[in-house]
Image (spheres, rainbow, N blue to C red):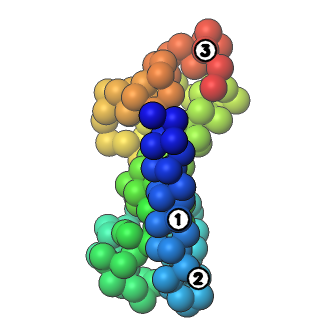
């Protein structure tokens, strides 16, 4: 069983490195550009078609290359950016939770609370109280 597990890990690592090596330098640069756009505009991110158009790569290639390079989907990366900023605001600001929800791009505070708990493993209120640390 151990030999099979190690072989599976090696096969997975090899296939990921082959995927990455099949990307041209231009494609890699475009994907990093897409990541930078998302990091700046996480409150209201562009749609995947808009993002692909902005960086000059087709949607399918962008999604696959993004996942290959960052081990996150585009949507997961956007959520990560939102939640990291929300964590900073919960700890360092006096904004109420609904204001933080709006500040990180959520239209409904309840949706933010659910997403934050899914991401962090505890509620924004618990993070605010300092009962849980990330």
What residue is pinned by disc 2? 29
Query: Does 121 appear above or below 48?
Result: above
Quadrant, the N terminus: top left
Task: Mark 2: give few (<14), some (14-19) or many (20+) Cα within 10 Å.
Answer: few
- Please state which of residues 76 and 112 is positioned toward the viewer in this rendering: 76
What residue is pinned by disc 3? 132
Check if mark 1's residue and mark 2's residue have beta carbons within 8 Å. no
Locate residue 34, reporting x and y percent: 50, 73
In this rendering, would 73 be left or right of 129? left
Locate residue 69, reporting x and y percent: 53, 66
* Circle 1: element type: helix
Q: Is residue 22 visible?
A: yes
- Please state which of residues 36 and 98 is positioned toward the viewer in this rendering: 36
- Please state which of residues 63 and 88 is positioned toward the viewer in this rendering: 63
* Circle 2: element type: helix
What residue is pinned by disc 1? 14
């Amino acid at each position: 069983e151990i030999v099979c597990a190690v072989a599976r890990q090696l096969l997975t690592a090899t296939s990921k490195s082959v995927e990455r090596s099949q990307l041209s330098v231009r494609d890699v640069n475009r994907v990093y550009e897409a990541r930078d756009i998302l990091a700046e505009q996480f409150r209201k991110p562009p749609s995947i078609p808009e993002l692909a158009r902005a960086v000059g790569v087709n949607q399918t290639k962008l999604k696959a290359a993004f996942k290959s390079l960052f081990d996150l989907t585009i949507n997961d990366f956007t959520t990560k950016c939102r939640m990291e900023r929300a964590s900073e605001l919960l700890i360092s600001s006096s904004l109420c939770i609904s204001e933080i929800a709006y500040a990180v791009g959520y239209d409904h505070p309840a949706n933010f609370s659910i997403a934050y708990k899914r991401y962090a493993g505890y509620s924004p209120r618990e993070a605010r109280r300092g009962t849980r640390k990330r």
